Image (tube, rainbow, N blue to C red):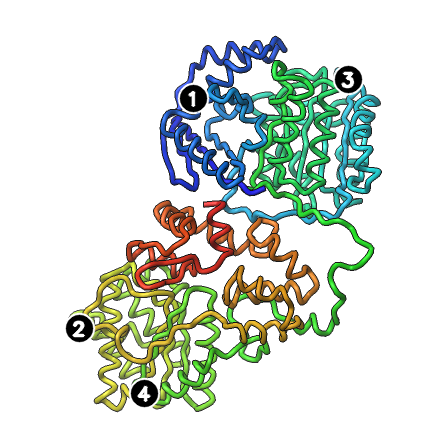
Amino acid sequence: MNYQDFQIIVDKNNHIRASSEQGEVSGELRWEKNQINLTLQLIDSGQTNSDLLKALGSQLYQALFPDKINARFQATIAAAQVNQESVRLRLIFESPELASLPWEFLYEEDTNIFLANNTETVLSRYIDVPLQQRDIKAADLPLKVLLVISTPTDLAALDVAEEEKLIREALAEHIDAGNIELDVLQEATRQEIQQKLREKPYNIFHFIGHGVFDNNQGYIVLVDKDGKAKYMDDENFANFFLGNKNLGLVILNSCQGAVVASNQAMRGTAPNLVRRGIPAVVAMQYSIFDNTAKLFADEFYRTLALGYPVDAAIQSTRNAISMEVGLDKRDFATPVLYMRAKDGIILDVKKKTDEPIIPIVNNNFIQSLEYPDGSVPLDSPFYLERNGIESLCSQTLEQPASLIRIKAPKLMGKTSLLRRIISTGIKQNYQGVYLDFGGVNKEVITNLDKFLRWLCCTVSLELELDDRVENNWNTSLLGSNDNCTAYFKKHILKPINSPLILVLDEVDRLFPYSEVLEDFFGMLRSWHEKGKTEEIWKQLRLVLAHSTEVYIPLDYHQSPFNAGLPVELEEFNQQQVEELATKHGIDSQDSMLPELRRMVGGHPYLLRLAMYDVAIAKTTLQDLLQSATTEAGIYRNHLSYLLDILRTAPDLVQALQRVVNSTAGVELDSIEIYKLHSLGLVIRQNNHVLPRCQLYRDYFRRVS
């Protein structure tokens, strides 16, 4: 099942921001606080009926979906139905008071539907952890479940035997089928839990027991060595799972007989666990009866073992509970899902097979492989020449006062080419300096004088020349450009007395700073022109590398971007893709290679990353392509990195949404094109742009 996303963020001032594929709308949350609280008191006491729950759900719906937001939500539902898709509704509340409300009762009067009960609208509480890697936990069947039952002797007794029996009965079919492996721990001490988690790579941690909520702090109740209650706050409880590579889900269940405070504790603990690294946590916001507990375990574990996203699994579970128990009880809205996986995928479930899925490869060959990280080493067999560009650049740099301009988006191989250009020059007894403007401090790069001093100093040090900048910078009579030019001539070009290849990478870092940009590039152009008449300037060979076009107009005669040799790095063609596959031990005629090209185009980095994982027997091309656009796929870190960048620029997100949702090229303004192209997300087609590859179209259509 495919999904259209609809995300609602309510800030601490009750301002609502809703985003979807149709764009972003906003509104204000207004709610009848006293009336809702009175209804909640009745529900907490178990005095419920269908009309009461619908009234509460309708009040919550009207508060969360004011006019514009409701219209956009209904449009999203309609679009999803046309495409035979469902809607993934993610709720984010910055106010603790609003977060504590039971939004799982959301009820739409027009359709007579509880949203949390509708399998076509999956509902979750989303916890955004922007700086945290969104990794997906690997999980081979059977799913390994650790059930921990805490029964302190000095608190209200729990029917341990019945609880275990219910879970085992619910999972019996799945255990017999080899889809689930269940271990039960009844001595819930800190030491026993830690030891158990070390013994086996558990995928799911299911806790049944007491909880308390005191001074805005949630506590999980374990037992001490004497069997008495030992209170553990949520931060320490989360420490059980730090660094766990397999755990994808924690379930916190306050069983029948637990007081309401226990459920408040669970609600407080759950989001904190997600913030500390657990991909998803299910907590019960009300105590539940035995038959509901059994229904929950049966339906939830069954759908999860089938590979369902966790939000779809919990939605299916709520639906099953409502059909069995009824909509006049609070049971269907009791499970609350907190997660940080936008697509709901927390476990990469793979079935066991008697035959190895991936062929065995030679260990020596694996050791010879290179993980694609940064520029390709000079002696690497995995570097592919770019249709004679290397030779053309080398021949050009043999010419006095030559200038080369290399343009390509990030991760397309610019730096690898630049390193080879310098290496070739050094073999001809040229001097070579490589400078990456991407790493220069903003304080330096935004001040022309500081920047040019930095340039002179850095080049001198790279050439092992004395740094004479401070003593030769005449600010009383000369401008910054004049000082820099004089310094280069007297203290760099003259002492080395040989051709100098000066490579300036990521020069588009200067593009936002027009004052520095105009003077600096005007100076470079003047150096190039001096080389036509002055012998000493003929020594200088300039190479400029940038990610996209200059979007700030420069004087034609003062810009280096309309002089010299222009070079644009293209994606790998079919022959190059097949050659790269062969270097990775992959059959160049493999039927899945064209499918890989359709997914990532000829993008060098994306191709190498895929082929590396296949070559080390980590996956197959078929499996790789199936999960490519998900957070279970090999591109998850790359895609998350791009997404985090886009999140800092809402206008850019909207521009990209237009591109990925259109079947034809889209016109954007020059700055939007520059930024998206420099990230490598789009390609130009006349005056329009298109997604660079299907991977970007599919992923950003889903998450942005």
Query: Which residue type carries mark 1?
Result: Ala
In this view, the mark in front (1 or 2): 1
- Circle nearer the N terminus (1, 2): 1
If you read the primary sequence from the N terminus, does the residue marked by circle 2 or circle 3 appear first?
Answer: 3
Mark 3: which secondary structure? Answer: loop
The residue singled out by tag 2 in the image is: 478
Q: Which residue is mark 1?
A: 63
The residue type indicated by label 3 comes to Asp
Does residue 251 sit above or below 359 in this rendering? above
Q: Residue at x 36, y 49 (%)?
A: 655
Nearest to the observer: residue 595 or residue 516: 595
Dot 1 crowding, Cα within 10 Å, few <14, some 14–19, many 20+: some
Residue 118 image point, x, y percent: 57, 28
Q: Residue 383: x percent and y percent?
A: 54, 76
Looking at marks 4 and 1 on the same chain, the residue that comes earlier in the sequence is marked by 1
State how far apart marks 4 and 1 are (Cα): 71 Å
Q: Earlier in the sequence, mark 4 or mark 3?
A: 3
State how far apart marks 2 and 4 are (Cα).
24 Å
Q: Amino acid at mark 4?
A: Gln
Q: Find disc 3 in the rendering and name its residue.
A: 154
Amino acid tagged 2: Leu
Vertical order, 277 against 320 (above or below) = below
Report the residue marked by disc 4: 539
Quadrant hosting residue 202: top right
Q: Secondary structure at mark 2?
A: loop
Residue 188 sits above or below residue 616 on the image: above
Task: Please tell me which of labels 1 and 3 falls first in the chain.
Answer: 1
